[in-house]
């Protein structure tokens, strides 16, 4: 089953059950956060490094590699 | 009344502990941060995981079946372990990092720590570029999400784990440009070839390795020994990697550089145990930084047992055997019980296998591939030069002046590397809370009545 999530206003398609990071990588997106002005994406993939944090439906600091994407999720990038 | 055994972690060690404790009549509760049991080894999603990536799946299904007789809390982030005046675990249950998760407190007569390990990836110039991930991340994305990290990936680091990672990337639809192993062929032959009769008991492992090697040969994937990725190139994303020969100490050999085109790099130089719960519980930690256990898998804290990678990096089979011993004893069993004979034998055989993994232990020369401006602490973007400037400062001094280790991951990623650079312990293992929780959740706990298991018995 296909799900759709909005990432910074762009709609991406993923497969039901994938994490937010899985949907992003599957759609060819590598970066969705910035640190010290440089792009960052997923690094550890298992919830340890916190490099993939995004805002999900208005809630900040969610690890994209740990959160299962739900149809209609609205994802915004974070910077620090 | 049966003993209440709480198990932290539902990977091979935790599942084996649960099964053994249930079989011995204990009242078992399993707390795991994942959505489904399996840990990293059996990470899966029913619809998204290619079953060819899994090993010993029937064994997993049997262990999972045993959980029917346990209380299982998935998506449980344990943030505090109390051992004074009884064993008590505090967790927040709900979707990862969601606001307003449910507070849960569980009391126990015995606790089994089966929290596993995560990748240790050494810093390298360019390693913060999107497209650079850990070997474990490549494995997790392939198993959990059914995606490859990129179209063409260089897999680099040290140890046999690079093999299943390369295989999983292929099965998830990516291609592997090269597998790059830092240890030279001679050292590997000496390390793994010594007294091979002791490896006879690990024949299953040998079969698994042969399968992976066959896979590499079929795909004509080069496997480089005595080499390392010493620089990753790109603007905004990975475009290539420099692969260079290294000496026995992992120091790059000048003049041997080759640039390989790729759009992702998976790095895995070994593993670091997830010690947070053990440290919070007050368990003695060995000089080489694993949880100290005796032949009973008992830690230095009464009632607290540990099994799997937190006690030493030895792979899933050792974790299964250790977990079975830990669970059985946590439930009140004795080590001399004949029912334990087989797992105790298996544990001994797999420890002999694990000794060989030391062949791939990180050597000190890796710091020679860093530039002054290479970021070491990813969270706070702290460079090698900045850390070197405070190398003689106190542990607190290094942290406060550079902010290395004070970011969101609390030194989980950079801690060991910072220690290598300052040649001293910086105590990044000592963290006030086990897992990241929101300040609001922490504050709210004071007002929220905890659901205490077995409250009615108090």
Image (spheres, rainbow, N blue to C red):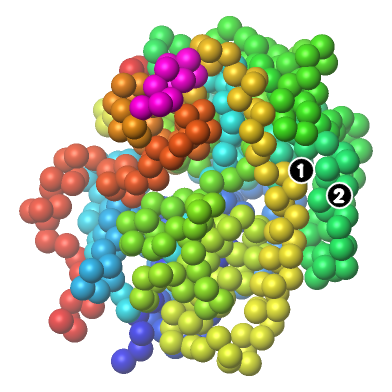
Label 1 vs label 2: CA separation?
A: 20 Å
Q: Which mark is residue B163?
A: 1
The answer to which of A41 and B182 lies nearer the viewer is B182
Residue shown at 86% from the left, 58% from the top: B194
Q: Is residue A24 left or right of residue B320?
A: left
Q: Element at badge 1?
A: helix
Q: Is residue B195 left or right of residue B302?
A: right
Quadrant assignment, res B60: bottom right
Q: Which residues are magenta?
A: B382-393
Position of residue A65 measured from the top left corner of the image (x, y, whole percent): 47, 36
Residue shown at 79% from the left, 65% from the top: B202
Q: Which mark is residue A66?
A: none
Label 1 resides on the chain identified as B
Say whether residue A5 is visible: no
Q: Which mark is residue B190?
A: 2
Residue shown at 53% from the left, 16% from the top: B374
Residue farthest toward the left in the current orientation of the protein: B447
Residue farthest toward the front in the current orientation of the protein: B392
- Which mark's residue is nearer the viewer, 1 or 2? 2
Position of residue B99 measured from the top left corner of the image (x, y, whole percent): 24, 41
């Amino acid at each position: 089953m296909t799900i759709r999530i909005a990432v910074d206003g762009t709609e991406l398609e993923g497969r039901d059950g994938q994490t937010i990071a899985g949907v992003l990588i599957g759609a060819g997106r590598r970066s969705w956060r910035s640190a010290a002005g440089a792009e960052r994406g997923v690094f550890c993939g298992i919830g340890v490094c916190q490099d993939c944090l995004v805002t999900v439906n208005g809630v900040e600091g969610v690890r994209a590699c740990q959160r299962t994407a739900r149809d209609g999720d609205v994802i915004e990038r974070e910077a620090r | 009344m049966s003993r209440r055994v709480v198990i932290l972690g539902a990977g091979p060690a935790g599942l084996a502990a649960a099964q053994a404790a249930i079989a011995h009549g204990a009242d078992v509760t399993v707390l795991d941060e994942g959505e489904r049991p399996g840990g990293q080894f059996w990470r899966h999603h029913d619809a998204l995981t290619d079953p060819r990536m899994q090993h010993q799946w029937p064994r997993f299904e049997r262990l999972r079946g045993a959980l029917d007789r346990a209380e299982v809390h998935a998506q449980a982030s344990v943030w505090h372990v109390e051992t004074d005046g009884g064993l008590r675990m505090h967790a927040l249950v709900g979707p990862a990092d969601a606001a307003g998760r449910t507070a849960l407190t569980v009391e126990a007569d015995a606790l089994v720590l089966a929290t596993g390990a995560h990748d240790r990836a050494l810093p390298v110039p360019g390693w913060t570029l999107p497209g650079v991930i850990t070997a474990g991340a490549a494995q997790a994305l392939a198993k959990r999400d059914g995606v490859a990290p990129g179209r063409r990936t260089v897999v680099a680091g040290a140890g046999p784990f690079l093999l299943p990672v390369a295989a999983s990337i292929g099965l998830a639809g990516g291609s592997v440009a090269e597998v790059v192993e830092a240890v030279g062929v001679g050292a590997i032959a000496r390390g793994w070839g010594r007294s091979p009769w002791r490896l006879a008991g690990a024949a299953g492992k040998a079969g698994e390795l042969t399968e992976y090697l066959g896979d590499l040969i079929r795909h004509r994937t080069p496997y480089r020994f005595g080499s390392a990725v010493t620089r990753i190139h790109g603007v905004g994303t990975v475009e290539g990697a420099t692969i260079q020969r290294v000496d026995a100490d992992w120091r790059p050999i000048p003049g041997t550089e080759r640039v390989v085109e790729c759009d992702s790099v998976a790095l895995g130089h070994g593993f670091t145990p997830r010690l947070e719960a053990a440290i919070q519980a007050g368990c003695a930690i060995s000089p080489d930084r694993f949880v100290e256990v005796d032949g009973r898998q008992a830690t230095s804290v009464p009632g607290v047992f540990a099994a799997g990678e937190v006690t030493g990096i030895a792979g899933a089979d050792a974790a299964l055997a250790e977990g079975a011993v830990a669970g059985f004893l946590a439930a009140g069993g004795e080590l001399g019980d004949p029912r334990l004979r087989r797992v105790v034998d298996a544990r001994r055989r797999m420890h002999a296998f694990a000794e060989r993994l030391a062949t791939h232990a990180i050597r000190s020369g890796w710091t020679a591939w860093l530039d002054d401006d290479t970021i070491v602490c990813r969270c706070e973007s702290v460079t090698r030069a900045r850390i070197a400037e405070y190398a003689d400062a106190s542990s607190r001094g290094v942290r406060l002046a550079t902010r290395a280790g004070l970011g969101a991951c609390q030194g989980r990623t950079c801690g060991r590397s910072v220690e290598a650079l300052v040649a001293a312990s910086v105590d990044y293992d000592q963290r006030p809370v086990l897992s990241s929780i929101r300040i609001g959740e922490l504050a709210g706990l004071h007002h929220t009545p905890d659901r205490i298991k077995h409250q009615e018995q108090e």
